[in-house]
């Protein structure tokens, strides 16, 4: 488990897949700006079984262990990308900002990578604020790059480079590698 001040990140285990599937297919959880996969439990389980070390799924948990969202990392070529979402009732309380900071520490401490990136819909202000508060820089607009709810949407590409991160904000090397 990766421990922050207000949230922890806990790796999703096989027995957690029913909840993960329920959230993943729930339009309110996915929000206005992310596609709804409508993936069956069997398809999700297959994807889980085929995860590589560069792909990991974590629950975002409050300190009392309540599961309030998810954050993942996955490879894009040789780069790593992150994605995140919270249940609606727990949004706007700063939880996701800390979850992203923990993830950035974890990835730079445990992997030989120079960059972490994220995409977000140009209209997704909350997501952009989370990324900017976690020191990601806006790189530009990727026009009509994702088909969401019947239309091609423009996405923003964000990234944080290792030299900008400089040092861990929350985790230590020992924790990230344990
Ligand atoms: C994006 C998301 C994860 C943000 O999580 P969160 O825990 O609410 O984020 P935080 O509380 O850490 O910070 C959110 C910031 O955005 C602001 N915000 C929240 N909702 C907003 C909205 N609808 N419009 C504008 N700003 C908003 C908050 O006020 C806060 O800014 P502040 O610190 O300046 O006050 C959450 O809204 C969510 O799950 N959305 C649905 C899934 C999604 O879009 N995921 C991202 C895909 S790229």
Image (tube, rainbow, N blue to C red):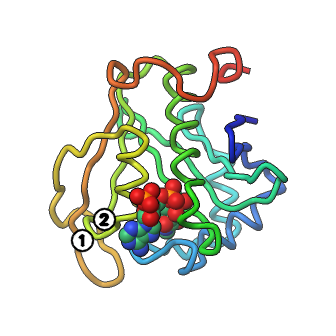
For this rendering, which residue is in front, 98 or 121?
Answer: 98
The residue drawn where x is 68% and y is 40% is 5
Q: Which residue is mark 2?
A: 121
In this picture, is 175 found above or below 155? above
Q: Is residue 34 visible?
A: no
The residue nearer to you, when weighing 1 against 166, is 166
Q: Is mark 1 within 8 Å of ligand 1?
A: no
x 56%, y 47%: residue: 72
Mark 2 or 1, nearer chain start: 2
Label 2 within 8 A of ligand 1 by Cβ: yes
Q: Position of residue 17 (x, y in %)?
A: 75, 60
Is 18 left, or right, of 144 in this rendering? right
Classify residue 56 as left or right of residue 13: left
Neighbourhood count class around disc 1 (C-alpha, 10 Å): few under 14, some 14–19, many 20 upward: some
Dot 2: few (<14), some (14–19), or many (≥20) neighbours within 10 Å? many
**Observer able to see residue 66:** yes
The x, y position of residue 150, in whole percent, is 30, 84
Which element type, helix, strand or loop, lies under badge 2?
strand
Asked whether the beta carbons under mark 2 and mark 1 sit within 8 Å of each other, the answer is yes
In this picture, is 18 found above or below 169?
Answer: below
Task: State the image quarter where residue 141 is shown.
Answer: bottom left
Q: Which quadrant would residue 8 be assigned to in this image?
A: top right
For label 1, the residue is 153
Q: Residue 21, position in %: x, y?
A: 68, 68
Q: Position of residue 67 (x, y in %)?
A: 75, 59
Looking at the image, is mark 2 or mark 1 nearer the viewer?
Answer: 2
Q: Which quadrant of the view contains residue 110? A: top right
């Amino acid at each position: 488990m990766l421990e922050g001040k207000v949230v922890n990140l806990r790796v999703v285990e096989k027995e957690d897949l029913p909840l993960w599937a329920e959230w993943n297919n729930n339009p309110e959880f996915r929000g206005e700006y992310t596609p709804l996969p409508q993936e069956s439990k069997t398809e999700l389980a297959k994807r889980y079984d085929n995860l590589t070390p560069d792909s990991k799924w974590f629950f975002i948990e409050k300190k009392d262990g309540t599961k309030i969202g998810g954050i993942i990392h996955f490879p894009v070529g040789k780069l790593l990308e992150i994605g995140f979402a919270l249940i609606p009732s727990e949004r706007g309380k700063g939880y996701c900002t800390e979850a992203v900071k923990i993830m950035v520490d974890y990835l730079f401490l445990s992997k030989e990578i120079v960059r972490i990136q994220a995409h977000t819909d140009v209209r997704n202000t909350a997501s952009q604020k989370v990324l900017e508060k976690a020191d990601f820089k806006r790189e530009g607009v990727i026009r009509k790059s994702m088909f969401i709810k019947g239309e091609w949407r423009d996405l923003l590409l964000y990234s944080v480079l290792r030299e900008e991160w400089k040092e861990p904000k929350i985790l230590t090397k020992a924790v990230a590698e344990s």
